Amino acid sequence: MIDIDASAGEGGGQVLRSSLSLSLLTGTPITLTGIRGRRPKPGLMRQHLTCVQAAQAIAPGATVQGAELGSQQLRFVPAPVQPGAYRFEIATAGSCLLVLQTVWLPLALAGGASELELSGGTHNPMAPPFPFIEQAFAPLLARLGAPAELELQRAGFYPAGGGRLKVRIAPAAALQPFDLLEPGALKARRAQAMAPGLPRSIAERELQTLAGQLDWPGDALEVLPCRQNEGPGNALWARLEHEVLTELFCAFGEKGRTAEDVAREVARAVQRHQQTGAALGPQLADQWLLPLALAVAQSGRGATFSASEWTEHARTNAGLVERFLPVVMHVTKAQGNAVRVELLPRPLGQNSRPDPPGTRPRGSWFGNS
């Protein structure tokens, strides 16, 4: 059993999601207290509760205590994960991509193919949006040995939600870690915007402003058609396609915010990242930690990546990963805010991040025991 203070560090919903994934992957029971303790409305909200329910659904026999709206405590005892067809629905605009990330790796390593249908928010300001997952994160996961196909059927924006997507998760091969120290040469750059239920001119102004800020040509700009969701929405993102990977930076329109402000936010994010020469942006680095650590633990080989920023989100996630998996991370400063992150297999007998007093020994790190 691992006892987790979910209010520590970043103190948001990621602690819950990563803990559930790691519990399923390692067969380790967990107890969480102070769930989302650093948020204005602490405890499980609809999307977080759906993550818990999804983790329980893919592992028939798992037991859960505290799975109710507003709960700040949760006990989860995993069971073997079963591949198959699943449908998860968030009745709000909560991010269904975060639900996907909770179950993605456990299903990939379950020994068979799975197909998921998810509904809720697909383009959320406080979560990785669909384009980021499809174009930046999923290709890296496929290269690691865990391919998946993602299909956006309908976009869902806050506050109405109503988005829908399908995901086909192939059985993972043995995960093989690899280094990501430089992005490689820039092959293409593209800015895309969508504004369902709103005047097209909003998306056009965003693209023109972004092009002016970054000195991008007109043929790199595109207003995307979008199947109407249950309410209006607006998103703008810039995609950098490098030889080694693709990065994507996104911002969202909201009431009272100008199209030009949205564009300037994306442009600043692109510029900050490019100035460092690092491979991964801050969000992709955060997302990459858990799957890479799993590959390092499974293969017994280390890997290193560079990131343009090491956020509190990433620090919290790194500490959590080290409690479940036999890996140790070394983070060193690089140019500006950039960092170099090295993940190494933990030597036998070494516990780099001890469990708090009173916890029982953890289960095996791999397999659904």
Image (cartoon, rainbow, N blue to C red):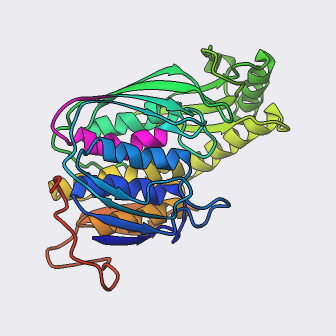
Q: Mark yes or no: residue 281 visible.
A: no
Percent coordinates x, y for residue 10 in the rendering: 55, 65
What residue do we see at 33% from left, 52% from top?
Answer: 21
Farthest residue toward the bottom? 357
- x%, y% of residue 58? 28, 41
What secondary structure do most residues of the magenta stretch adopt? Answer: helix
**In terms of depth relative to the viewer, which is nearer, 362 or 238?**
362
Quadrant for the C terminus in the image: bottom left
Quarter that holds the N terminus = bottom left
Q: Where is residue 268, by image quadrant?
A: top right
Question: What is the span of residues highlighted in magenta in the rendered image?
Answer: 97-115
Q: Is residue 109 magenta?
A: yes
Position of 81 compared to 4: left or right?
left
Q: Is 331 located above or below residue 199 in the figure?
A: below
Would you say residue 156 sits in the magenta stretch?
Answer: no
299, 270: nearer the viewer:
299
Q: In the image shown, does 33 or 125 lie closer to the viewer?
A: 33
